[in-house]
Image (cartoon, coloured by chain):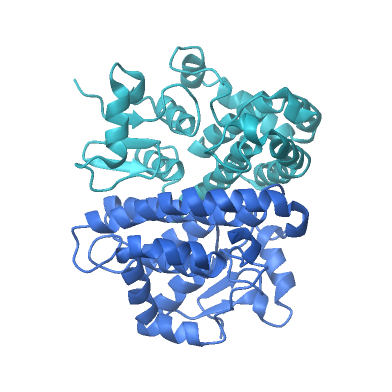
Chain colours: A blue, B cyan
Amino acid sequence: MTKPYQLYYWPGIQGRGEFVRLALEEAGVPYEDVARLKKGMPAMMASLDGDAVDHPSFAPPVLRAGELLIGQTANILLFIGAHHGLAPRAEQGRLWAHQLQLTVADIVNEAHDTHHPISTNLYYEDQKKEARARARDFTAQRIPKFLDYFEGVLQRNPGRGSYMVGSRLSYVDLSLFQLMEGLRYAFPKAMAQLEPSYPGLVALHAMVQARPRIAAYLASKRRIPFNEDGIFRHYPELEK
Amino acid sequence: MTKPYQLYYWPGIQGRGEFVRLALEEAGVPYEDVARLKKGMPAMMASLDGDAVDHPSFAPPVLRAGELLIGQTANILLFIGAHHGLAPRAEQGRLWAHQLQLTVADIVNEAHDTHHPISTNLYYEDQKKEARARARDFTAQRIPKFLDYFEGVLQRNPGRGSYMVGSRLSYVDLSLFQLMEGLRYAFPKAMAQLEPSYPGLVALHAMVQARPRIAAYLASKRRIPFNEDGIFRHYPELEK
């Protein structure tokens, strides 16, 4: 029987697809990670701009929900959040959660550009010098600026517990978990120095990691390990 | 009397705020462009993360609608689209319009990075060599890739006329107009070569430009001219 959702994303990396995987796992809804199935890659490519597709996507991830085909990570989370209780129902809370997700997307883009500052069409090895300069700026200036912001959001949240939005878990918490995971993997030295300044985010990461469905997912083969093909890459020379 | 909306954005540039301005102008709703008023800059900064702000923003633009404070350009357009008939009402169309807007945001980010590939904290002059390399990739690879995509979306749209989404104007059309404007300003040589391949987008740009409210706006002092402080900058050396 077909599962309710099909996720189309590159099979070998966490990448942007991981934000969607975490939301689907926490929601407990069955999904197929299509490109990881046998002969899944042609199906993934067809989902982007095949002839049968009315609404083509520029890039994966793409989520199929029956007839609906949704692209852009934050947009997919907007959908999952609304349908699976992972975002506030009221407009104000819904927009606020989405604003935070779009800000996560911004730092994720910048994390990507630390290893590809000149071109995604060139190898990392061919833009290493520029990568070093960009990574230096990212770890010294941009990570603190973004984490200051997210920690400030946590501190201002009058809701109970330590959630980003209101008093319940939302996809934003899951995305912040993944952001912290990725930054720790890519820039362990910088993060070891920075983390004491962000107790709220550290606690949030631990809280998400301990949620039963997330813990089960992280221990499963469905979780692809970080690697140097993804967005968060560990190149020790970028921390020197 | 207070107008229904206040826009908080840098006063001297079109920047990301321009996508919001175009939507408000087309919707015909009165708004204050706060930072351009006398003593407006402190008000803008306070809107980002002042003590009275429950939902701080990482960066402008921010739109105030009564009690509601909304950040992130695409998120603001999601709100304006829903409240002023500039997006489909049904979920499927709403998500589709938003997906396209987020893809516009992606190319806008990349356009920004052509003049700041290493760091937003350094002057353009201090990253000129890298800017040249990134701009070369942007004009040769990325602009065609994105415009191929958007032209393809237009061609697949079964709706009447030449709109991006369905058979009515949406904020996506306004944003595509602004994207074409910005690319023409920043990279006139590249665009002169490329445009014959994108007749749909060229026609869309002309259609938006001729809409009475947009035409009036563009002729007014409310439209800030492009300049070399914004996102789309014309540095002739980047096209060599």
Up-down: is B98 above or below A1?
A: above
In the rendered structure, the answer to whether residue A72 lies left or right of residue A229 reads left
Q: Quadrant of residue B177?
A: top right
The structure residue drawn at horizontal position 66% and vertical position 52%, both measured from the top left corner, is A131
In the rendered structure, the answer to whether residue A202 lies left or right of residue B163 reads left
The structure residue drawn at horizontal position 46% and vertical position 50%, both measured from the top left corner, is B94
Q: How many marks?
A: 0
In the image, B72 versus B115, the foreground residue is B115
The structure residue drawn at horizontal position 52% and vertical position 87%, both measured from the top left corner, is A220
On the image, the x and y values in percent for residue B90 come to: 43, 52
On the image, the x and y values in percent for residue B52 come to: 19, 41
Q: Is residue B211 visible?
A: yes
Task: Looking at this view, name the residue that lies furthest to the front.
Answer: A240
In the image, B158 versus A231, the foreground residue is A231
Q: Quadrant of the C terminus of chain A?
A: bottom right
Up-down: is A96 above or below A225?
A: above
Q: Quadrant of residue A87?
A: bottom left
Q: Is residue B90 visible?
A: no
In the image, A178 versus A50, the foreground residue is A178
On the image, the x and y values in percent for residue A64 come to: 56, 67
Q: Quadrant of the N terminus of chain A?
A: bottom right
Q: Quadrant of residue A226?
A: bottom right
The structure residue drawn at horizontal position 36% and vertical position 66%, both measured from the top left corner, is A173
In the rendered structure, the answer to whether residue A80 lies left or right of residue B100 reads left
On the image, the x and y values in percent for residue A97 come to: 35, 56
